[in-house]
Image (cartoon, rainbow, N blue to C red):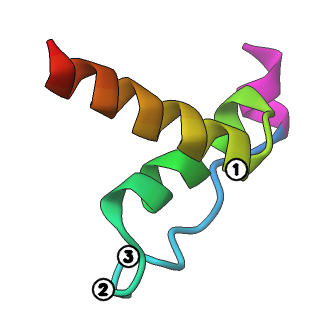
Amino acid sequence: MKYYTEHPEPRNDFAADDSISATDRHARRLSHRLGFPIAHVRTALVVNAAVKEQN
């Protein structure tokens, strides 16, 4: 887990900001951890939620 020790978790600047959705906050955290662009992670989260709703 070398990545986690070299790149600390970003500050949660959006914690008190109600204009940022929970999905966006989650995407931001995952993006930082996985190294993918935030837009890609958010799209994957939204598609995953839509598929779960259909089932």
Q: How far apart are marks 2 and 3 (CA)?
A: 8 Å
Which circle's residue, 1 or 3, is located before the other in the chain? 3
State the residue in front, 12 or 44: 44
Q: How far apart are marks 1 and 3 (CA)?
A: 17 Å
Looking at the image, residue 25 lies above or below residue 17: above
Which circle's residue, 2 or 1, is located before the other in the chain? 2
**Residue 46 location (% of width, % of height):** 43, 40
Q: Counting other residues with Cα less than 10 Å from the Cα at mark 2, is it few (<14), some (14-19), or many (20 or more)? A: few
Residue that numbered label 3 is attached to: 15
Q: Is residue 18 left or right of residue 41?
A: left
Q: Counting other residues with Cα less than 10 Å from the Cα at mark 3, is it few (<14), some (14-19), or many (20 or more)? A: few
Residue that numbered label 2 is attached to: 18
User: Which amino acid does the dot numbered 2 rest on?
Assistant: Asp
Q: Which residue is drawn at 70% across and 50% down?
A: 38
Q: Is mark 2 on a helix, strand or loop?
A: loop
State the residue in front, 41 or 6: 41
Residue 44: quadrant of the picture: top right
Q: Is mark 1 on a helix, strand or loop?
A: helix
Residue that numbered label 1 is attached to: 38
Looking at the image, residue 15 lies above or below residue 17: above
Q: Identify the image quadrant of the C terminus.
A: top left
Q: Identify the image quadrant of the N terminus.
A: top right
**Residue 36 location (% of width, % of height):** 79, 34
Q: What element carries label 3?
A: loop
Q: Distance between the residues labelled 2 and 1?
A: 19 Å
Q: Counting other residues with Cα less than 10 Å from the Cα at mark 1, is it few (<14), some (14-19), or many (20 or more)? A: some
Looking at the image, residue 21 lies above or below residue 48: below
Residue 40: quadrant of the picture: top right
User: Which amino acid does the dot numbered 1 rest on?
Assistant: Ile
In magenta, the rendered stretch is: 1-6
